[in-house]
Amino acid sequence: MIHPDTKIKFISDTIGYGVVATKFIPKGTVTWVQDPLDTVYPPTAVQKLPPEIREYLNFYSFTNRFGDKVLCWDNGKYVNHSFNPSCFTTPYDFEIAIRDISPGEELTDDYGYLNIEKPFVPLNEGTERKTVYPDDLVTYHGQWDNLIRNCLPYVFTANQPLLNFIPKQTWETFKTYKDHPALMPSVLESYFNPIKSYEKHVYQSKHQ
């Protein structure tokens, strides 16, 4: 579920549509939570879909740590990529604002943590990174962990309209890292390794 103070807006001919804030969203605010209405497609279910439907699914969904496709039921699927994102993932199936987001400003993600299947070159933002790769989580998880950990103090002072959509046990666990941020699990836990998944599938097939 995307933050309620957002809406879909046409950004440009190059980018298309995106999600923008309709009110000020402070740093540390939970901006998206995976909820029960989001549809999760295991690889076996994806393979059974018609090619045209699979193409749409691949475009609008992301891949979780298990290799499943997750399709957001609301405007969350329109959040665009940026190498300077305003939001970032945690290992707990929710994202937070890593800086203040002003009204009219886009909510963006770094697609490098969404387990893309193929590299792609997005709009040039003048950053050192120019290409998004499938293994960006492996490459950058260290600096991304620090990014999230530095935001932790703000998470527990910001108003959280999406808090009721986060499982209570998940939030209680997350709260334990407020005073011990270095102990928070790495975002690398969100990484899906297709090679290991294939090897596991082959092993299980041989031993059934």
Image (cartoon, rainbow, N blue to C red):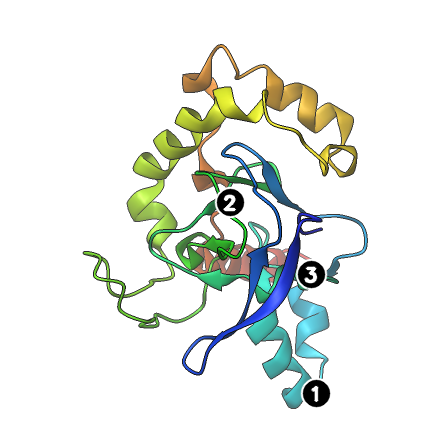
Vertical relation: 24 (above or below) 113: above
Q: Residue at x 34, y 46 (%)?
A: 138
Q: Is residue 46 visible?
A: yes
In the rendered structure, which disc, 3 or 1, sits on the residue that comes first in sequence?
A: 1
Which residue is more in the foreground, 145 or 157? Answer: 157
The residue that disc 1 covers is 50
In the rendered structure, which disc, 2 or 1, sits on the residue that comes first in sequence?
A: 1
Numbered badge on residue 72: 3
Judge the density around disc 3: few (<14), some (14-19), many (≥20) Cα neighbours within 10 Å: many
Helix, strand or loop status at disc 1: loop
Q: Percent x, y for residue 5?
A: 67, 49
Q: Amino acid at mark 1?
A: Pro
Mark 3 touching mark 2, by CB under 8 A?
A: no
In the rendered structure, which disc, 3 or 2, sits on the residue that comes first in sequence?
A: 3
Query: Quick check: 45 left or right of 106?
Result: right
Q: Amino acid at mark 3?
A: Cys
Judge the density around disc 1: few (<14), some (14-19), many (≥20) Cα neighbours within 10 Å: few
The residue that disc 2 covers is 190
Q: CA distance from mark 3 to mark 2?
A: 17 Å
Which residue is more in the foreground, 135 or 110? Answer: 110
Q: Percent x, y for residue 65?
A: 55, 49
Mark 2 touching mark 1, by CB under 8 A?
A: no
